[in-house]
Amino acid sequence: MKNITILISGSGTNLQRIIDATKSSEIENAKINLVIADRPCFGLERAEKEGIENILIKRGKDFSENLENQIPENTDFIILAGFLSILTKEFCNKYEGKIINIHPSLLPKFGGKGMWGHHVHQAVLDANEKESGATVHFVTHGIDEGEIILQKSFPIDEGDTVEILQKKVHVVEKEIFPKAINLVLNKV
Ligand code: GRF
């Protein structure tokens, strides 16, 4: 059984998807040992409701050190599921090959600093892209630059807005995230 620690900052719909997939064994041999949030968010309530241990580590001074200290000894794998803080180089190196992230674009397009949430979708629309999508990738020190595990695209239709792209991305994220986790989890 692999122990997964999940890091979040937001509403936690991807967290919920992972919780459900571990319960149904769609994600095999995995247990969520801890959910960590870097700000108060609904995702923490989801974890609490599911009886999963969860903590809030406030951002600011000593955040990185506190985060590192809170990762349980028995953690095999770390998943960033809508986590907005930037991890330090030391943290990324320590868990190299053992951290993955989901990003709401077709990386390497529309990744990097400042490219999160609605900023990504706005940039995609501004660039007149014909398609967008979601990507699950390994986390390295370079923001959104690690090796891609799985990616799925969808067409952008005439009149699509930031909100519509957000909804479309959420649908493909829920599809690829558990698959990507299965692909890599048993190799760590
Ligand atoms: C997702 O769209 C993910 O790609 C991005 O943040 C969003 C998190 O949504 N990194 P949720 O908190 O899982 O609902």
Image (cartoon, rainbow, N blue to C red):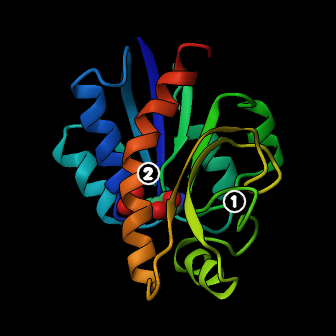
Q: In the depicted view, which residue is nearer to us: 173 or 93?
A: 173
Q: How many marks?
A: 2
Q: Which residue is drawn at the image coordinates 65% and 42% (left, top)?
A: 137
Residue 161: x and y, percent? 44, 86
Front residue (pair 20, 121)? 121
Q: Quadrant of residue 171?
A: bottom left
Q: Can you say which quadrant of the picture contains the C terminus? A: top right
Task: Work out whether 73 lies above or below 121.
Answer: above
Q: Is residue 102 left or right of residue 96?
A: left
Percent position of residue 51, x then y = 20, 37
Counting from the top left corner in percent of width and height, residue 90 is at 81, 42
Categorize mark 2 by other alpha carbons within 10 Å: few (<14), some (14-19), many (20+). Answer: many
| Circle 1 SS class | loop
Q: Amino acid at mark 2?
A: Glu
Question: Toward which corner of the image does residue 94 lie, by quadrant?
Answer: top right
Residue 3 appears in the picture as rendered: yes
| Mark 2 residue CB less than 8 A from any atom of ligand 1 | yes
Q: Which residue is mark 1?
A: 86
Q: Are marks 2 and 1 in contact (CB under 8 Å)?
A: no
Picture residue at 46% right of the left edge, 66% below the top: 39
The three-letter amino acid code for the residue at tag 1 is: Ile
